[in-house]
């Protein structure tokens, strides 16, 4: 079962960076529940994005929670800075060797804890930590670039995790990130997604189309 309504978390990686504050305000007005912020270091993934200074600069533009997704090799170097900059949730990757240490560090900062798993990663490695997490983020594309094709086979992980959550009565949510649009959102929801991270499918419509885009993703929840 899902925890409440399905939430929409626009990924600002696809937004107009020249008007980032206005873009965030526009998706908030359009009905977004959260803001998803992708942090890339050019090492863990082959791309570079933004740092804590950018997150700090956009924090005054909205009251929505910030999910900061750290696609970086050494998150321990950045967790404190992003927490101070305004992150409400810090998400690290299961592929890193020190996941348990990162979970404890995030908790010590008073932030919600998320762990993300890449398409080629199975769920076994995160099962020992599920009761310590606020969110598991399932990547349905290879991390690093927006606009990729949705990998439906990744949704089997959601089915497994939802079953475990129900069996153990865990208070954890499952998020899907990558290639989420009107066609793929129902597939994710049917398999147990609580949060849909969407970038291109929202921001490509321009500010005048954000409300319609978000409503379309929400409308897909009726198929669940």
Image: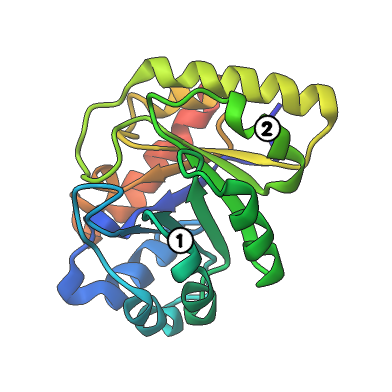
Secondary structure beneath label 2: loop
Q: Which residue shows up at 51% across the image and 53% down it?
A: 91
Crowd rating for badge 2 (residues with CA inside 10 Å; few <14, some 14–19, many 20+): some
Q: Position of residue 149 (x, y in %)?
A: 23, 27
Residue 78 appears in the figure: no
Q: Quadrant of the C terminus?
A: top right
109, above or below 102, in the image: below
Foreground pick, 39 / 165:
39
Foreground pick, 27 / 136:
136
In which image quadrant can residue 161 be found?
top right
Read off the residue under disc 1.
75
Residue 148 left/right relative to 167: left
- Measured in 3D between alpha carbons, the distance from the residue under mark 1 to the one under mark 2, in whole angstroms, is 30 Å
In which image quadrant can residue 83 be found?
bottom right
Q: Position of residue 34 (x, y in %)?
A: 50, 59
Read off the residue under disc 2.
2
Crowd rating for badge 1 (residues with CA inside 10 Å; few <14, some 14–19, many 20+): some
Q: Position of residue 147 (x, y in %)?
A: 19, 39
Q: Which residue shows up at 62% across the image and 34% down it?
A: 126
Instruction: Please say if the residues under marks 1 and 2 sit with CB atoms less than 8 Å apart.
Output: no
Q: Position of residue 28 (x, y in %)?
A: 43, 65
181, above or below 54, in the image: above
Q: Which residue shows up at 46% across the image and 56% down it?
A: 32
Q: Quadrant of the N terminus?
A: top right
């Amino acid at each position: 079962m899902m925890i409440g309504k399905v939430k929409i978390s626009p990924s600002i990686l696809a937004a107009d960076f020249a008007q980032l504050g206005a873009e965030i305000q526009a998706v908030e007005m359009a009905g977004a529940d959260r803001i998803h912020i992708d942090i890339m270091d050019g090492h863990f993934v082959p791309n570079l994005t933004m740092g804590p200074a950018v997150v700090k600069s956009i924090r005054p533009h909205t009251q929505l929670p910030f999910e900061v997704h750290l696609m970086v090799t050494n998150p321990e170097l950045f967790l404190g800075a992003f927490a101070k900059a305004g992150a409400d949730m810090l998400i690290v990757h299961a592929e890193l060797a020190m996941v348990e240490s990162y979970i404890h560090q995030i908790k010590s900062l008073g932030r919600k804890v998320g762990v993300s798993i890449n398409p080629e990663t199975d769920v076994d490695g995160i099962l020992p930590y599920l009761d310590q997490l606020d969110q598991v983020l399932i990547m349905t594309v290879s991390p690093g670039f927006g606009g990729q094709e949705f990998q439906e086979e990744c949704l089997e992980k959601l089915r497994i995790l939802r079953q475990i959550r129900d069996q153990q009565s865990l208070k954890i949510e499952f998020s899907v990130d990558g290639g989420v649009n009107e066609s793929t959102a129902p597939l994710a929801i049917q398999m147990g997604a609580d949060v849909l991270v969407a970038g291109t499918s929202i921001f490509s419509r321009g500010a005048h189309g954000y409300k319609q885009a978000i409503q379309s993703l929400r409308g897909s929840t009726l198929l669940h």
